Amino acid sequence: MEKYLKKAKEAASAIATLSPEKKKSVLKKMANDLVASSSYIVEQNRLDIEEGQRNNLSEALMDRLYLDKSRVEAMAQAVREIADLKEPVGRVLEGWVTDNGLRIEKVSIPIGVISIIYESRPNVTSDAAALCFKSGNVAILKGGKEAQKSNEAIAGIIQNSLESEGLPKAVISLLPDASREGVAKLIKMDRYVDLVIPRGGEGLIRYVSENATVPVVKHDKGLCHTYIHKGADFEEAIAIAINAKCQRPGVCNAMETLIVDEAIAGELLPQLKAAFESHDTELLGDSMTRQIIDVKEASEEDFATEYLANRLSIRLVSNIDEAISHIRKYGSGHSEAIVTNDHKAAEKFLNEVDAACVYVNASTRFTDGGAFGFGAEVGISTNKLHARGPMGINDLTTYKYKIFGEGQIR
Amino acid sequence: MEKYLKKAKEAASAIATLSPEKKKSVLKKMANDLVASSSYIVEQNRLDIEEGQRNNLSEALMDRLYLDKSRVEAMAQAVREIADLKEPVGRVLEGWVTDNGLRIEKVSIPIGVISIIYESRPNVTSDAAALCFKSGNVAILKGGKEAQKSNEAIAGIIQNSLESEGLPKAVISLLPDASREGVAKLIKMDRYVDLVIPRGGEGLIRYVSENATVPVVKHDKGLCHTYIHKGADFEEAIAIAINAKCQRPGVCNAMETLIVDEAIAGELLPQLKAAFESHDTELLGDSMTRQIIDVKEASEEDFATEYLANRLSIRLVSNIDEAISHIRKYGSGHSEAIVTNDHKAAEKFLNEVDAACVYVNASTRFTDGGAFGFGAEVGISTNKLHARGPMGINDLTTYKYKIFGEGQIR
């Protein structure tokens, strides 16, 4: 493992200063090579699919695993789009001159060696590889074991593209030991690895956070709320609530709990109930909610659960402070929304709710690199430090200070 | 410990949204209260001094520990200067409108609960407290045990200032269990603590990095180089080298190794030797250096050592690539300098050397929040993520996205 990581570290200095033009052409080559080898990728993917069938993987998991020629074409297209992103390295983030005439520039640079640990979608392999490469970083990838053959095929093709462009294979590689022990070793290797990004189940993320000496940017759960304030437009509120819950219930930026002001609950809750029922949403409510509409009881545990399903807890509050307190207690700091036309309430919510993304009059479903306009997305960080919320390619850079002197001494 | 940290976490939401005016007035009150209680602080400091004498602390340590009325006045003055820094919270870092009309603002906010672990200078207690408070963060401070009585006196006065201004004492406090076990517990409490900043010996920093689940920003060692390129102006090069080594040898941004191009070594080394000898610097050199000037041999270990003393290793190289390789192998990523008038060499060095601060024609001694113009300094980060190099008060903030919609759904 140490020998492998040493090579990765060495490769990092080789690619940190590649020209934007060269990076772009290598990525375009990768995309073309993926398409040219799509039969081979699909063939290897069949082996994963067969293994998955033997292991009775769920239909959802099988769908995420599955590749055909058009999905490989989409993977290649994503790589081409990453190739065309604005160059992330060398941006001058700040610059100034000190009293004694030193000219200081704060400039974005690659982080170095980045490891990304993810689940079973093989397209993440090419996405993550391309994002790391475009930002001048070495990528150590560790995908789900269900997709092992597919990932090996994709990574192999990418490594051939690198070699044919005169770059070392170590620039993008799969972690050779993909077992739990392999991950355990990797996350302690802070001499060689500069950042680890775990994406996946809570268990994995907790394990990595607790054991890593390498800095971690987590992609943890989203327990998101929408608060319908008494100053809301009802039609807008219902549309936002339905969208936040039902458009794609299984994702981290979907709403899990709806908070409603008591003052409007008598009129609004029956309308909400009808709207959610037409979307087959299972509703649960606190005791006050249940005095107005006939729904199951929401327990303390329900309010603390990320359902990732078409189920919704409802809580009534007497004012905005109670709503904010509820979110402080149960929220995961991911995405929170208020629906209101009351300016002071909107400002208070925006300022006092501590979450990566705080919305006024929009669906929490927009917490996403694509929706934010970042182009390709690295993920959605639930860290407070380094990167928070949707991560674009610029979040795969750090910075250095360049200081230009004329002989200054202290 | 958990009860104590819970209070700290609660206090964090209380102070995150304090107005800039209020923060300024509380800090001014703290400064005045410190001056008004200077007799008490000095009295308590005497107990630490006496204990230090009993334990035969070094003269340098005793000097750092020592307080008198004028040093307390200087502490208060530093707090006043922090009060007058530009408000770090609420800066709009970026802002844009998405295609569907969402207005997105990336806004700086406090990190939350910050723990700072430091050595025996009692003024760090008031500095760190003021920096955290000004940036809207709760401070959990853990100073060296040699300064325990002094720190208790300072923190007690600050807590009284907080209370008299209607704020909870938990906003700024000393870690109640200041033992190694107390620190061990603290750094695992990621539910309550958002960031830990260890400043001090390598052992402490290594321990915290290896065991923390709380994110860590390290203030690690500086093994800094100055490379005199063949295109250098000799007079300038000698002045910079002398300053980088001798002006204050015991600090992290002082030079430890001087790298010189072979092409100019025959002429330059004797001049350098004479200059360093007049500053009582002990010189060591590699074999090629020793063919030109009569100095002791520098071993492999010397090149890997942060002397923190008036001692210098000298290495000759045949070209800039060899210099950069040497720095890659032995440098700590802190501060590195090239002296040259050759533009291409300067650009190459700036781009290829991976360090927080890379200098052309200036002394590495400028790596410092004050010298950078940040006002008060939190420290000098050797992290690659979150904050790198001199940390100003803005580095004690993170960000959230505020998203302003008009009913947008996906």
Image: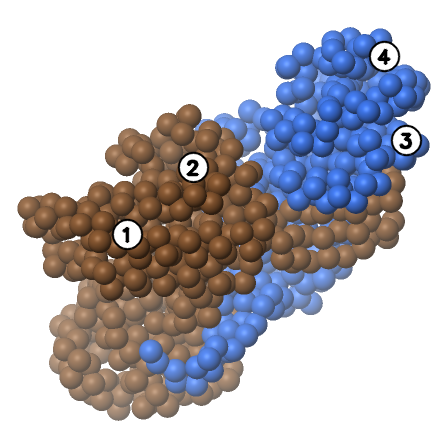
Chain colours: A brown, B blue
Where does label 2 land, which residue? Answer: A170
Chain of the residue displaying label 2: A
Whether residue A174 is situated above or below residue B31 in the rendered picture: above
SS label for mark 1: loop
Q: Quadrant of the C terminus of chain A?
A: top right
Chain of the residue displaying label 1: A
Q: Amino acid at mark 3?
A: Phe
Q: Nearer the viewer, mark 2 or mark 1?
A: 1
Q: Amino acid at mark 1?
A: Ser
Distance from disc 1 to disc 4, alpha carbons, whole Å, reads 62 Å
Q: Amino acid at mark 2?
A: Ala
Where does label 3 land, which residue? Answer: B234
SS label for mark 3: helix
Whether residue B205 is situated above or below residue B99 in the rendered picture: above
- Determine if marks 1 and 4 fall on one subunit: no
Distance from disc 2 to disc 4, alpha carbons, whole Å, reads 43 Å
Whether residue B364 is situated above or below residue B295 in the rendered picture: below
Residue B53 visible, this orientation: no
- Determine if marks 2 and 4 fall on one subunit: no
Q: Position of residue A105 (x, y in %)?
A: 72, 53
Q: Nearer the viewer, residue B391 or B321?
A: B321
Chain of the residue displaying label 4: B
Q: Position of residue B350 (x, y in %)?
A: 70, 43
Q: Residues within 10 Å of mark 1 (few under 14, many from 20)?
A: some
Where does label 1 land, which residue? Answer: A37
- Determine if marks 2 and 3 fall on one subunit: no
Where does label 4 land, which residue? Answer: B293
Q: Nearer the viewer, mark 2 or mark 3?
A: 2
Q: Do labels 2 and 1 touch, CB within 8 Å? A: no
Q: Position of residue A362 (x, y in %)?
A: 39, 79
Q: Identify the residue shown where x is 43% and y is 43%.
A: A164
